[in-house]
Image (cartoon, rainbow, N blue to C red):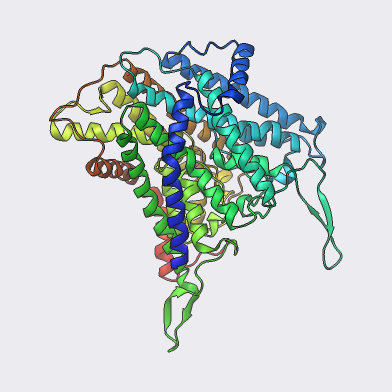
Amino acid sequence: MTINGWVQIALFCIVVIAITRPLGGYMTRVFKGERNFLSPVFHPIERGIYAVCGVNEREEQHWLTYAVSVLLFSLAGFLALYALQRLQGILPFNPAGQSAVEESLAFNTSISFVTNTNWQSYVPETTMSYLTQMAGLTVHNFMSAAAGIAMALALIRGFARRESKTIGNFWVDLTRCTLYVLLPISIIVGLFFVWEGMPQTLGAYVDAATLDGAKQTIAVGPVASQEAIKMLGTNGGGFFNANSAHPFENPNALTNFIQLVLIFSLGAALTNVLGRMVGNEKQGWAVFAAMGLLFLVGTTTVYWAEAKGNPAFAQLNVDQTPSALQAGGNMEGKEVRFGIANSALFTTVTTDASCGAVNTMHDSLMPLGGLVPLVNIQLGEVIFGGVGSGLYGMLAFAIVAMFVAGLMVGRTPEYLGKKLEAKEVKMTILALLSLPLATLGFTALASVIPAGLGGPLNTGPHGFSEILYAFTSATGNNGSAFAGITANTTFYNSALGVAMFVGRFVFVVPLLAVAGFLAQKKLVAPSAGTFPTTGGLFVGLLVGVVLIFGGLTYFPAVALGPVVEHVAMNAGTLYPSP
Protein backbone atom coordinates (compact mmCIF):
# COMPACT_ATOMS: atom_id res chain seq x y z
CA MET A 1 0.00 0.00 0.00
CA THR A 2 1.28 3.44 -0.92
CA ILE A 3 0.47 7.05 -0.01
CA ASN A 4 -0.36 7.71 -3.66
CA GLY A 5 -2.88 4.87 -3.60
CA TRP A 6 -4.58 6.19 -0.46
CA VAL A 7 -4.68 9.71 -1.90
CA GLN A 8 -6.55 8.42 -4.96
CA ILE A 9 -9.03 6.53 -2.76
CA ALA A 10 -9.50 9.62 -0.55
CA LEU A 11 -10.11 11.81 -3.61
CA PHE A 12 -12.83 9.42 -4.77
CA CYS A 13 -14.51 9.59 -1.36
CA ILE A 14 -14.39 13.40 -1.33
CA VAL A 15 -15.98 13.68 -4.77
CA VAL A 16 -18.79 11.24 -3.89
CA ILE A 17 -19.58 13.15 -0.68
CA ALA A 18 -19.46 16.48 -2.54
CA ILE A 19 -21.98 15.51 -5.22
CA THR A 20 -24.43 13.68 -2.94
CA ARG A 21 -26.40 16.67 -1.65
CA PRO A 22 -26.73 18.74 -4.87
CA LEU A 23 -27.60 15.67 -6.95
CA GLY A 24 -30.02 14.49 -4.27
CA GLY A 25 -31.71 17.90 -4.23
CA TYR A 26 -32.10 17.88 -8.00
CA MET A 27 -33.52 14.34 -8.02
CA THR A 28 -35.98 15.24 -5.26
CA ARG A 29 -37.34 18.13 -7.34
CA VAL A 30 -37.61 15.87 -10.38
CA PHE A 31 -39.56 13.15 -8.61
CA LYS A 32 -41.86 15.62 -6.88
CA GLY A 33 -42.74 17.02 -10.30
CA GLU A 34 -41.29 20.44 -9.48
CA ARG A 35 -39.81 22.69 -12.13
CA ASN A 36 -36.04 22.42 -12.67
CA PHE A 37 -33.49 23.81 -15.09
CA LEU A 38 -34.14 21.01 -17.62
CA SER A 39 -37.93 21.45 -17.58
CA PRO A 40 -38.01 23.73 -20.66
CA VAL A 41 -36.34 20.98 -22.68
CA PHE A 42 -37.86 17.79 -21.31
CA HIS A 43 -41.28 18.74 -19.93
CA PRO A 44 -42.92 18.90 -23.39
CA ILE A 45 -41.40 15.51 -24.19
CA GLU A 46 -42.60 14.14 -20.87
CA ARG A 47 -46.17 15.28 -21.51
CA GLY A 48 -46.02 13.85 -25.02
CA ILE A 49 -45.01 10.46 -23.66
CA TYR A 50 -47.92 10.49 -21.23
CA ALA A 51 -50.33 11.40 -24.02
CA VAL A 52 -49.11 8.62 -26.30
CA CYS A 53 -49.12 6.01 -23.51
CA GLY A 54 -52.40 7.10 -21.95
CA VAL A 55 -50.84 7.91 -18.57
CA ASN A 56 -52.39 10.45 -16.20
CA GLU A 57 -49.48 11.91 -14.26
CA ARG A 58 -51.80 13.02 -11.43
CA GLU A 59 -53.26 9.56 -10.93
CA GLU A 60 -51.32 7.52 -8.37
CA GLN A 61 -51.26 3.77 -7.74
CA HIS A 62 -51.92 1.42 -4.86
CA TRP A 63 -48.84 -0.63 -3.96
CA LEU A 64 -50.26 -3.73 -5.65
CA THR A 65 -50.96 -1.84 -8.87
CA TYR A 66 -47.46 -0.37 -8.69
CA ALA A 67 -45.94 -3.85 -8.30
CA VAL A 68 -48.01 -5.28 -11.18
CA SER A 69 -46.86 -2.38 -13.37
CA VAL A 70 -43.23 -3.20 -12.57
CA LEU A 71 -43.75 -6.88 -13.39
CA LEU A 72 -45.64 -6.27 -16.64
CA PHE A 73 -43.11 -3.70 -17.83
CA SER A 74 -40.27 -6.11 -17.09
CA LEU A 75 -42.07 -8.97 -18.86
CA ALA A 76 -42.54 -6.86 -21.98
CA GLY A 77 -38.86 -5.89 -21.91
CA PHE A 78 -37.82 -9.52 -21.49
CA LEU A 79 -39.87 -10.69 -24.49
CA ALA A 80 -38.66 -7.83 -26.71
CA LEU A 81 -34.99 -8.44 -25.93
CA TYR A 82 -35.37 -12.20 -26.38
CA ALA A 83 -36.95 -11.70 -29.82
CA LEU A 84 -34.25 -9.21 -30.84
CA GLN A 85 -31.48 -11.69 -30.01
CA ARG A 86 -33.16 -14.58 -31.78
CA LEU A 87 -33.75 -12.49 -34.92
CA GLN A 88 -30.52 -10.48 -35.04
CA GLY A 89 -29.14 -12.60 -37.89
CA ILE A 90 -31.72 -11.14 -40.30
CA LEU A 91 -31.86 -7.64 -38.85
CA PRO A 92 -29.75 -4.59 -39.90
CA PHE A 93 -26.72 -3.03 -38.19
CA ASN A 94 -24.88 -6.33 -38.08
CA PRO A 95 -21.60 -5.70 -39.94
CA ALA A 96 -19.86 -8.73 -38.37
CA GLY A 97 -22.67 -11.04 -39.48
CA GLN A 98 -23.60 -12.30 -36.00
CA SER A 99 -26.05 -15.20 -36.11
CA ALA A 100 -29.10 -15.73 -33.88
CA VAL A 101 -28.29 -16.16 -30.19
CA GLU A 102 -28.88 -19.69 -28.86
CA GLU A 103 -32.12 -20.17 -26.90
CA SER A 104 -30.81 -20.68 -23.36
CA LEU A 105 -28.25 -17.89 -23.77
CA ALA A 106 -30.93 -15.53 -25.12
CA PHE A 107 -33.11 -16.39 -22.10
CA ASN A 108 -30.25 -15.74 -19.69
CA THR A 109 -29.22 -12.47 -21.35
CA SER A 110 -32.79 -11.17 -21.54
CA ILE A 111 -33.58 -11.72 -17.88
CA SER A 112 -30.09 -10.49 -17.00
CA PHE A 113 -30.54 -7.05 -18.56
CA VAL A 114 -34.18 -6.70 -17.49
CA THR A 115 -33.17 -7.26 -13.86
CA ASN A 116 -30.23 -4.80 -14.04
CA THR A 117 -27.81 -7.73 -13.58
CA ASN A 118 -25.99 -7.70 -16.94
CA TRP A 119 -24.50 -11.14 -16.36
CA GLN A 120 -22.78 -12.09 -19.61
CA SER A 121 -22.26 -15.76 -20.43
CA TYR A 122 -21.01 -14.77 -23.87
CA VAL A 123 -18.26 -12.80 -25.62
CA PRO A 124 -20.09 -9.58 -26.62
CA GLU A 125 -17.97 -8.65 -29.64
CA THR A 126 -18.47 -12.07 -31.25
CA THR A 127 -22.08 -12.66 -30.19
CA MET A 128 -24.17 -9.47 -30.26
CA SER A 129 -24.84 -7.26 -33.31
CA TYR A 130 -24.75 -3.48 -33.11
CA LEU A 131 -28.55 -3.39 -33.19
CA THR A 132 -28.83 -5.81 -30.27
CA GLN A 133 -26.25 -3.80 -28.32
CA MET A 134 -28.01 -0.48 -28.97
CA ALA A 135 -31.74 -1.21 -29.20
CA GLY A 136 -31.62 -4.12 -26.77
CA LEU A 137 -28.89 -3.98 -24.16
CA THR A 138 -28.37 -0.22 -23.94
CA VAL A 139 -32.09 0.51 -23.83
CA HIS A 140 -32.51 -1.97 -20.99
CA ASN A 141 -29.61 -0.34 -19.19
CA PHE A 142 -31.78 2.78 -19.03
CA MET A 143 -35.06 1.03 -18.30
CA SER A 144 -33.89 -1.37 -15.59
CA ALA A 145 -32.01 1.43 -13.83
CA ALA A 146 -35.05 3.71 -13.93
CA ALA A 147 -37.26 0.90 -12.63
CA GLY A 148 -34.90 0.32 -9.70
CA ILE A 149 -34.94 3.99 -8.73
CA ALA A 150 -38.73 4.06 -9.06
CA MET A 151 -39.09 1.18 -6.60
CA ALA A 152 -36.79 2.93 -4.13
CA LEU A 153 -38.94 6.06 -4.43
CA ALA A 154 -42.05 4.00 -3.68
CA LEU A 155 -40.54 2.79 -0.41
CA ILE A 156 -39.40 6.32 0.49
CA ARG A 157 -42.94 7.57 -0.06
CA GLY A 158 -44.19 4.84 2.25
CA PHE A 159 -42.22 6.44 5.07
CA ALA A 160 -42.87 10.04 4.01
CA ARG A 161 -46.65 9.94 3.54
CA ARG A 162 -49.36 9.78 6.13
CA GLU A 163 -52.69 8.00 5.79
CA SER A 164 -52.28 7.55 2.04
CA LYS A 165 -53.45 4.60 -0.03
CA THR A 166 -51.01 5.29 -2.87
CA ILE A 167 -47.23 5.28 -3.27
CA GLY A 168 -46.83 7.11 -6.58
CA ASN A 169 -47.19 6.19 -10.24
CA PHE A 170 -44.65 3.76 -11.67
CA TRP A 171 -44.99 5.05 -15.23
CA VAL A 172 -44.43 8.65 -14.14
CA ASP A 173 -41.44 7.71 -11.96
CA LEU A 174 -39.95 5.66 -14.81
CA THR A 175 -40.38 8.47 -17.34
CA ARG A 176 -39.02 11.25 -15.14
CA CYS A 177 -36.02 9.24 -14.05
CA THR A 178 -35.08 8.41 -17.63
CA LEU A 179 -35.68 11.89 -19.07
CA TYR A 180 -34.35 14.15 -16.34
CA VAL A 181 -31.65 12.02 -14.65
CA LEU A 182 -30.27 9.15 -16.70
CA LEU A 183 -30.44 10.58 -20.22
CA PRO A 184 -28.82 14.02 -19.77
CA ILE A 185 -25.97 12.71 -17.62
CA SER A 186 -25.35 9.84 -20.05
CA ILE A 187 -25.19 12.21 -23.03
CA ILE A 188 -22.60 14.42 -21.34
CA VAL A 189 -20.52 11.50 -20.10
CA GLY A 190 -20.78 9.71 -23.45
CA LEU A 191 -19.36 12.74 -25.27
CA PHE A 192 -16.57 12.96 -22.69
CA PHE A 193 -15.74 9.29 -23.22
CA VAL A 194 -15.53 9.83 -27.00
CA TRP A 195 -13.16 12.72 -26.35
CA GLU A 196 -11.02 10.39 -24.22
CA GLY A 197 -10.73 7.84 -27.03
CA MET A 198 -13.67 5.43 -26.75
CA PRO A 199 -15.07 4.30 -30.13
CA GLN A 200 -18.57 5.44 -31.13
CA THR A 201 -19.22 4.15 -34.62
CA LEU A 202 -21.54 1.98 -36.69
CA GLY A 203 -18.68 1.07 -39.01
CA ALA A 204 -17.44 -2.47 -39.55
CA TYR A 205 -14.75 -4.12 -37.46
CA VAL A 206 -11.24 -3.01 -38.43
CA ASP A 207 -8.64 -5.37 -39.91
CA ALA A 208 -5.02 -4.68 -39.01
CA ALA A 209 -1.69 -6.32 -39.80
CA THR A 210 0.45 -7.37 -36.85
CA LEU A 211 4.26 -6.98 -36.74
CA ASP A 212 4.74 -10.55 -37.94
CA GLY A 213 2.36 -10.04 -40.85
CA ALA A 214 -0.69 -11.81 -39.44
CA LYS A 215 -4.20 -10.41 -39.78
CA GLN A 216 -5.97 -9.18 -36.66
CA THR A 217 -9.61 -8.08 -36.49
CA ILE A 218 -10.23 -5.26 -34.02
CA ALA A 219 -13.78 -4.99 -32.75
CA VAL A 220 -15.29 -1.49 -32.57
CA GLY A 221 -18.83 -0.15 -32.37
CA PRO A 222 -21.08 2.28 -30.44
CA VAL A 223 -19.08 1.81 -27.24
CA ALA A 224 -19.08 5.22 -25.51
CA SER A 225 -22.86 5.58 -25.41
CA GLN A 226 -23.29 2.17 -23.82
CA GLU A 227 -20.41 2.72 -21.40
CA ALA A 228 -21.95 5.87 -19.95
CA ILE A 229 -25.27 4.30 -18.94
CA LYS A 230 -23.56 1.03 -18.05
CA MET A 231 -21.82 2.85 -15.19
CA LEU A 232 -24.41 5.47 -14.27
CA GLY A 233 -27.18 2.87 -14.17
CA THR A 234 -24.96 0.38 -12.28
CA ASN A 235 -25.58 -2.16 -15.04
CA GLY A 236 -22.04 -3.35 -15.69
CA GLY A 237 -22.40 -5.27 -18.94
CA GLY A 238 -19.41 -4.64 -21.17
CA PHE A 239 -19.34 -3.99 -24.91
CA PHE A 240 -16.21 -6.13 -24.90
CA ASN A 241 -15.44 -9.35 -23.07
CA ALA A 242 -12.70 -7.73 -20.99
CA ASN A 243 -15.20 -5.12 -19.77
CA SER A 244 -13.63 -2.04 -18.18
CA ALA A 245 -10.17 -3.60 -18.38
CA HIS A 246 -10.42 -3.14 -22.18
CA PRO A 247 -8.71 0.06 -23.39
CA PHE A 248 -11.69 0.88 -25.63
CA GLU A 249 -14.01 0.77 -22.60
CA ASN A 250 -11.64 2.40 -20.12
CA PRO A 251 -8.73 4.13 -21.85
CA ASN A 252 -6.93 5.80 -18.95
CA ALA A 253 -6.86 6.72 -15.26
CA LEU A 254 -9.23 9.67 -15.76
CA THR A 255 -11.96 7.59 -17.41
CA ASN A 256 -11.46 5.00 -14.69
CA PHE A 257 -12.05 7.64 -12.02
CA ILE A 258 -15.15 8.99 -13.76
CA GLN A 259 -16.56 5.48 -14.05
CA LEU A 260 -16.04 4.90 -10.34
CA VAL A 261 -17.86 8.13 -9.46
CA LEU A 262 -20.72 7.28 -11.83
CA ILE A 263 -21.26 3.91 -10.15
CA PHE A 264 -21.78 5.48 -6.71
CA SER A 265 -23.35 8.80 -7.73
CA LEU A 266 -27.07 7.97 -7.92
CA GLY A 267 -26.99 5.45 -5.08
CA ALA A 268 -25.38 8.02 -2.79
CA ALA A 269 -27.74 10.77 -3.95
CA LEU A 270 -30.78 8.62 -3.16
CA THR A 271 -29.84 8.69 0.52
CA ASN A 272 -30.21 12.46 0.36
CA VAL A 273 -33.53 12.06 -1.48
CA LEU A 274 -34.66 9.92 1.46
CA GLY A 275 -33.73 12.61 3.97
CA ARG A 276 -35.39 15.39 1.99
CA MET A 277 -38.62 13.51 1.35
CA VAL A 278 -39.08 12.53 5.02
CA GLY A 279 -38.31 16.09 6.06
CA ASN A 280 -34.98 15.50 7.81
CA GLU A 281 -31.77 15.32 5.79
CA LYS A 282 -29.93 13.90 8.81
CA GLN A 283 -31.86 10.66 8.32
CA GLY A 284 -30.32 10.33 4.87
CA TRP A 285 -26.85 11.15 6.12
CA ALA A 286 -27.14 8.47 8.81
CA VAL A 287 -27.86 5.85 6.14
CA PHE A 288 -25.01 7.31 4.06
CA ALA A 289 -22.65 6.98 7.04
CA ALA A 290 -23.53 3.31 7.56
CA MET A 291 -22.90 2.61 3.89
CA GLY A 292 -19.66 4.60 3.92
CA LEU A 293 -18.29 2.72 6.93
CA LEU A 294 -18.87 -0.66 5.29
CA PHE A 295 -17.32 0.66 2.06
CA LEU A 296 -14.12 1.78 3.80
CA VAL A 297 -13.69 -1.58 5.54
CA GLY A 298 -14.08 -3.45 2.26
CA THR A 299 -11.73 -1.20 0.29
CA THR A 300 -9.02 -1.38 2.95
CA THR A 301 -9.22 -5.18 3.08
CA VAL A 302 -8.95 -5.65 -0.70
CA TYR A 303 -6.13 -3.11 -1.00
CA TRP A 304 -4.19 -4.75 1.84
CA ALA A 305 -4.64 -8.28 0.50
CA GLU A 306 -3.63 -7.39 -3.06
CA ALA A 307 -0.69 -5.21 -2.00
CA LYS A 308 0.62 -8.00 0.23
CA GLY A 309 0.37 -10.59 -2.55
CA ASN A 310 0.90 -14.32 -2.53
CA PRO A 311 3.38 -15.68 0.06
CA ALA A 312 4.39 -18.35 -2.45
CA PHE A 313 6.05 -15.56 -4.45
CA ALA A 314 7.50 -13.62 -1.53
CA GLN A 315 10.78 -11.87 -2.23
CA LEU A 316 13.99 -12.52 -0.31
CA ASN A 317 15.48 -9.87 1.93
CA VAL A 318 19.12 -8.88 1.79
CA ASP A 319 20.00 -11.57 4.33
CA GLN A 320 18.18 -14.18 2.18
CA THR A 321 15.30 -14.54 4.65
CA PRO A 322 11.84 -14.63 3.09
CA SER A 323 9.74 -11.49 3.27
CA ALA A 324 6.03 -11.56 3.99
CA LEU A 325 5.35 -9.49 0.87
CA GLN A 326 5.31 -10.35 -2.81
CA ALA A 327 7.38 -7.83 -4.73
CA GLY A 328 4.98 -5.31 -6.27
CA GLY A 329 1.94 -7.05 -4.82
CA ASN A 330 -0.45 -9.28 -6.73
CA MET A 331 -0.68 -7.81 -10.24
CA GLU A 332 -2.16 -10.92 -11.84
CA GLY A 333 -5.36 -10.02 -13.71
CA LYS A 334 -4.80 -6.27 -13.28
CA GLU A 335 -4.07 -3.51 -15.76
CA VAL A 336 -0.73 -1.74 -15.28
CA ARG A 337 -2.38 1.57 -16.18
CA PHE A 338 -4.59 1.30 -13.08
CA GLY A 339 -2.36 -0.48 -10.56
CA ILE A 340 -3.34 -2.19 -7.32
CA ALA A 341 -4.99 0.78 -5.57
CA ASN A 342 -7.43 1.61 -8.37
CA SER A 343 -8.06 -2.06 -9.03
CA ALA A 344 -8.90 -2.66 -5.36
CA LEU A 345 -11.13 0.43 -5.30
CA PHE A 346 -12.95 -0.61 -8.48
CA THR A 347 -13.42 -4.16 -7.15
CA THR A 348 -15.05 -2.85 -3.98
CA VAL A 349 -17.18 -0.17 -5.62
CA THR A 350 -18.59 -2.39 -8.36
CA THR A 351 -19.71 -5.03 -5.84
CA ASP A 352 -20.94 -2.53 -3.26
CA ALA A 353 -23.25 -1.39 -6.03
CA SER A 354 -25.07 -3.89 -8.21
CA CYS A 355 -22.85 -2.90 -11.11
CA GLY A 356 -20.67 -5.86 -12.05
CA ALA A 357 -18.30 -3.91 -14.29
CA VAL A 358 -14.69 -4.91 -13.68
CA ASN A 359 -11.31 -3.39 -14.45
CA THR A 360 -9.52 -6.37 -12.89
CA MET A 361 -10.29 -10.07 -13.04
CA HIS A 362 -11.86 -11.11 -9.72
CA ASP A 363 -10.83 -14.71 -10.33
CA SER A 364 -7.18 -13.58 -9.93
CA LEU A 365 -7.67 -11.82 -6.61
CA MET A 366 -6.05 -13.17 -3.47
CA PRO A 367 -8.44 -15.27 -1.32
CA LEU A 368 -9.20 -12.42 1.08
CA GLY A 369 -9.30 -9.96 -1.80
CA GLY A 370 -11.91 -12.15 -3.47
CA LEU A 371 -13.77 -12.59 -0.20
CA VAL A 372 -14.72 -8.90 -0.04
CA PRO A 373 -16.61 -8.62 -3.37
CA LEU A 374 -18.31 -11.93 -2.58
CA VAL A 375 -19.46 -10.69 0.83
CA ASN A 376 -20.42 -7.27 -0.57
CA ILE A 377 -22.94 -8.93 -2.87
CA GLN A 378 -24.14 -11.38 -0.23
CA LEU A 379 -24.97 -8.49 2.10
CA GLY A 380 -27.48 -7.37 -0.52
CA GLU A 381 -25.24 -4.72 -2.11
CA VAL A 382 -26.60 -2.22 0.38
CA ILE A 383 -23.36 -0.20 0.42
CA PHE A 384 -24.75 2.61 -1.79
CA GLY A 385 -25.84 -0.24 -3.99
CA GLY A 386 -27.37 -0.26 -7.42
CA VAL A 387 -29.63 2.53 -8.56
CA GLY A 388 -32.50 2.13 -6.14
CA SER A 389 -31.77 -1.41 -5.03
CA GLY A 390 -29.06 -0.35 -2.58
CA LEU A 391 -31.36 2.07 -0.77
CA TYR A 392 -34.39 -0.17 -0.53
CA GLY A 393 -32.11 -3.02 0.59
CA MET A 394 -30.58 -0.87 3.33
CA LEU A 395 -34.02 0.36 4.40
CA ALA A 396 -35.04 -3.28 4.77
CA PHE A 397 -32.13 -3.76 7.17
CA ALA A 398 -33.10 -0.53 8.94
CA ILE A 399 -36.56 -1.98 9.59
CA VAL A 400 -34.97 -5.10 11.07
CA ALA A 401 -32.55 -2.97 13.12
CA MET A 402 -35.37 -0.91 14.61
CA PHE A 403 -37.35 -4.08 15.30
CA VAL A 404 -34.37 -5.41 17.27
CA ALA A 405 -34.00 -2.07 19.07
CA GLY A 406 -37.68 -2.15 19.99
CA LEU A 407 -37.32 -5.62 21.44
CA MET A 408 -34.36 -4.53 23.54
CA VAL A 409 -36.18 -1.62 25.17
CA GLY A 410 -39.66 -3.14 25.24
CA ARG A 411 -41.28 -0.57 22.92
CA THR A 412 -43.16 -0.86 19.67
CA PRO A 413 -40.45 -0.34 17.04
CA GLU A 414 -40.70 2.71 14.82
CA TYR A 415 -38.60 4.25 12.07
CA LEU A 416 -38.92 7.66 10.44
CA GLY A 417 -42.08 8.30 12.40
CA LYS A 418 -43.87 5.10 11.38
CA LYS A 419 -44.64 2.27 13.79
CA LEU A 420 -43.34 -1.08 12.52
CA GLU A 421 -45.90 -3.79 13.11
CA ALA A 422 -45.89 -7.52 12.42
CA LYS A 423 -46.95 -7.32 8.78
CA GLU A 424 -44.14 -4.93 7.82
CA VAL A 425 -41.50 -6.98 9.63
CA LYS A 426 -42.77 -10.25 8.13
CA MET A 427 -42.68 -8.87 4.59
CA THR A 428 -39.19 -7.47 5.17
CA ILE A 429 -37.88 -10.79 6.46
CA LEU A 430 -39.51 -12.57 3.51
CA ALA A 431 -37.64 -10.28 1.12
CA LEU A 432 -34.30 -10.66 2.90
CA LEU A 433 -34.54 -14.48 3.12
CA SER A 434 -35.34 -14.86 -0.58
CA LEU A 435 -31.76 -13.93 -1.49
CA PRO A 436 -29.86 -16.64 0.48
CA LEU A 437 -32.51 -19.17 -0.52
CA ALA A 438 -31.65 -18.72 -4.20
CA THR A 439 -27.90 -18.19 -3.69
CA LEU A 440 -27.22 -21.16 -1.41
CA GLY A 441 -29.84 -23.43 -2.94
CA PHE A 442 -28.48 -23.18 -6.47
CA THR A 443 -24.86 -23.31 -5.22
CA ALA A 444 -25.58 -26.56 -3.37
CA LEU A 445 -27.24 -28.02 -6.46
CA ALA A 446 -24.40 -27.00 -8.80
CA SER A 447 -21.82 -28.42 -6.40
CA VAL A 448 -23.17 -31.98 -6.61
CA ILE A 449 -24.53 -32.52 -10.12
CA PRO A 450 -22.34 -33.12 -13.21
CA ALA A 451 -23.82 -30.16 -15.10
CA GLY A 452 -22.76 -27.84 -12.28
CA LEU A 453 -19.37 -29.40 -11.61
CA GLY A 454 -18.45 -29.01 -15.27
CA GLY A 455 -18.41 -25.22 -14.91
CA PRO A 456 -15.48 -24.32 -12.61
CA LEU A 457 -12.03 -24.06 -14.13
CA ASN A 458 -10.19 -24.56 -10.84
CA THR A 459 -10.15 -27.41 -8.38
CA GLY A 460 -10.38 -27.25 -4.59
CA PRO A 461 -11.90 -24.35 -2.65
CA HIS A 462 -11.33 -21.85 -5.45
CA GLY A 463 -13.48 -23.94 -7.77
CA PHE A 464 -16.24 -23.89 -5.15
CA SER A 465 -15.80 -20.12 -4.87
CA GLU A 466 -16.37 -19.79 -8.61
CA ILE A 467 -19.75 -21.55 -8.28
CA LEU A 468 -20.71 -19.64 -5.13
CA TYR A 469 -19.73 -16.31 -6.66
CA ALA A 470 -21.75 -17.00 -9.82
CA PHE A 471 -25.02 -17.59 -7.98
CA THR A 472 -24.26 -14.84 -5.46
CA SER A 473 -23.71 -12.41 -8.33
CA ALA A 474 -26.85 -13.52 -10.19
CA THR A 475 -29.12 -13.36 -7.14
CA GLY A 476 -27.61 -10.04 -6.12
CA ASN A 477 -28.19 -8.68 -9.65
CA ASN A 478 -24.50 -7.78 -9.81
CA GLY A 479 -23.22 -9.50 -12.95
CA SER A 480 -19.51 -9.82 -12.14
CA ALA A 481 -17.94 -13.26 -11.89
CA PHE A 482 -14.97 -15.30 -10.85
CA ALA A 483 -14.37 -15.57 -14.56
CA GLY A 484 -12.83 -19.04 -14.48
CA ILE A 485 -16.31 -20.55 -14.55
CA THR A 486 -17.82 -21.71 -17.85
CA ALA A 487 -21.40 -20.48 -17.54
CA ASN A 488 -22.62 -20.67 -21.15
CA THR A 489 -24.33 -24.03 -20.72
CA THR A 490 -28.01 -24.92 -20.57
CA PHE A 491 -27.83 -25.59 -16.84
CA TYR A 492 -26.03 -22.41 -15.85
CA ASN A 493 -27.94 -20.18 -18.26
CA SER A 494 -31.24 -21.47 -16.87
CA ALA A 495 -30.33 -21.63 -13.18
CA LEU A 496 -28.63 -18.23 -13.16
CA GLY A 497 -31.62 -16.74 -14.97
CA VAL A 498 -34.00 -17.99 -12.29
CA ALA A 499 -31.66 -16.67 -9.58
CA MET A 500 -31.68 -13.21 -11.22
CA PHE A 501 -35.48 -13.21 -11.26
CA VAL A 502 -35.62 -14.07 -7.55
CA GLY A 503 -33.02 -11.46 -6.67
CA ARG A 504 -34.94 -8.67 -8.41
CA PHE A 505 -38.65 -9.39 -8.14
CA VAL A 506 -39.15 -11.85 -5.27
CA PHE A 507 -37.06 -9.45 -3.21
CA VAL A 508 -38.74 -6.19 -4.16
CA VAL A 509 -42.44 -7.09 -4.28
CA PRO A 510 -42.64 -7.65 -0.49
CA LEU A 511 -40.89 -4.31 0.02
CA LEU A 512 -43.46 -2.58 -2.18
CA ALA A 513 -46.08 -4.14 0.09
CA VAL A 514 -44.21 -2.65 3.06
CA ALA A 515 -44.31 0.74 1.30
CA GLY A 516 -48.08 0.43 0.90
CA PHE A 517 -48.61 -0.56 4.54
CA LEU A 518 -46.44 2.29 5.83
CA ALA A 519 -48.07 4.92 3.62
CA GLN A 520 -51.43 4.21 5.29
CA LYS A 521 -50.10 4.89 8.79
CA LYS A 522 -50.10 8.12 10.72
CA LEU A 523 -46.84 9.81 11.63
CA VAL A 524 -45.93 9.26 15.26
CA ALA A 525 -44.48 12.24 17.09
CA PRO A 526 -41.08 11.50 18.67
CA SER A 527 -41.08 11.04 22.43
CA ALA A 528 -38.52 10.54 25.20
CA GLY A 529 -38.47 6.81 24.45
CA THR A 530 -38.01 7.14 20.69
CA PHE A 531 -34.80 5.55 19.42
CA PRO A 532 -32.79 8.30 17.66
CA THR A 533 -32.00 7.39 14.06
CA THR A 534 -29.70 10.23 13.08
CA GLY A 535 -26.66 9.53 15.26
CA GLY A 536 -23.78 7.15 15.73
CA LEU A 537 -25.76 4.68 17.83
CA PHE A 538 -28.19 4.04 14.97
CA VAL A 539 -25.36 3.83 12.44
CA GLY A 540 -23.58 1.23 14.59
CA LEU A 541 -26.76 -0.77 15.11
CA LEU A 542 -27.55 -0.74 11.39
CA VAL A 543 -24.03 -1.84 10.43
CA GLY A 544 -24.15 -4.54 13.11
CA VAL A 545 -27.46 -5.93 11.85
CA VAL A 546 -26.17 -6.04 8.26
CA LEU A 547 -23.00 -7.89 9.29
CA ILE A 548 -24.74 -10.29 11.69
CA PHE A 549 -27.38 -11.19 9.13
CA GLY A 550 -24.73 -11.79 6.48
CA GLY A 551 -22.48 -13.73 8.82
CA LEU A 552 -25.18 -16.04 10.14
CA THR A 553 -26.47 -16.70 6.64
CA TYR A 554 -23.36 -17.07 4.51
CA PHE A 555 -20.36 -17.82 6.76
CA PRO A 556 -20.51 -21.65 6.36
CA ALA A 557 -20.47 -21.31 2.57
CA VAL A 558 -17.77 -18.63 2.56
CA ALA A 559 -15.67 -20.75 4.92
CA LEU A 560 -15.62 -23.54 2.33
CA GLY A 561 -14.32 -21.18 -0.33
CA PRO A 562 -12.14 -18.08 0.23
CA VAL A 563 -11.44 -18.76 3.91
CA VAL A 564 -10.19 -22.31 3.33
CA GLU A 565 -8.22 -21.14 0.30
CA HIS A 566 -6.50 -18.43 2.36
CA VAL A 567 -5.54 -20.88 5.11
CA ALA A 568 -4.30 -23.44 2.59
CA MET A 569 -2.28 -20.80 0.73
CA ASN A 570 -0.48 -19.71 3.90
CA ALA A 571 0.23 -23.38 4.63
CA GLY A 572 1.82 -23.76 1.19
CA THR A 573 -1.00 -25.83 -0.33
CA LEU A 574 -1.93 -24.72 -3.84
CA TYR A 575 -4.70 -25.91 -6.15
CA PRO A 576 -3.50 -25.52 -9.74
CA SER A 577 -5.90 -25.44 -12.66
CA PRO A 578 -6.39 -28.83 -14.37
Q: Residue at x 33, y 46 (%)?
A: 551
Q: Is residue 222 above or below residue 277?
A: below
Q: Is residue 45 found left or right of 427 in the rendered image?
A: right
| Image-quadrant location for residue 532 | top left
Q: Is residue 538 left or right of residue 295?
A: left
- Percent x, y for residue 39? 56, 24
Which residue is more in the foreground, 320 or 203? 203
Residue 51 in sight in this render: yes
Q: Judge whether residue 562 can be spotted in this image.
A: no
Q: Nearer the viewer, residue 497 or 491?
A: 497
Q: Residue at x 70, y 35 (%)?
A: 134
Q: Position of residue 125 (x, y in %)?
A: 72, 46
Quadrant where the C terminus lies? bottom right
Residues 495 and 409: in front is: 409
* Residue 247 point in image, percent of width and height: 67, 55
Q: Residue furthest right?
A: 213
Q: Which residue lies at the image location 68% right of the left edge and 49% below the top edge?
A: 195
Q: Position of residue 391 (x, y in %)?
A: 40, 35
On the rendered structure, is 217 left or right of 465?
right
Image position of 159 (left or right of 509):
left
Query: Which part of the image, by quadrant, shows the N terminus?
Result: bottom left
User: Against 374, is 329 above or below?
Assistant: below
Instruction: Kindly identify the residue that appears in the image at 35 percent across and 13 percent down.
Output: 164
Q: Residue at the bottom extreme?
A: 319
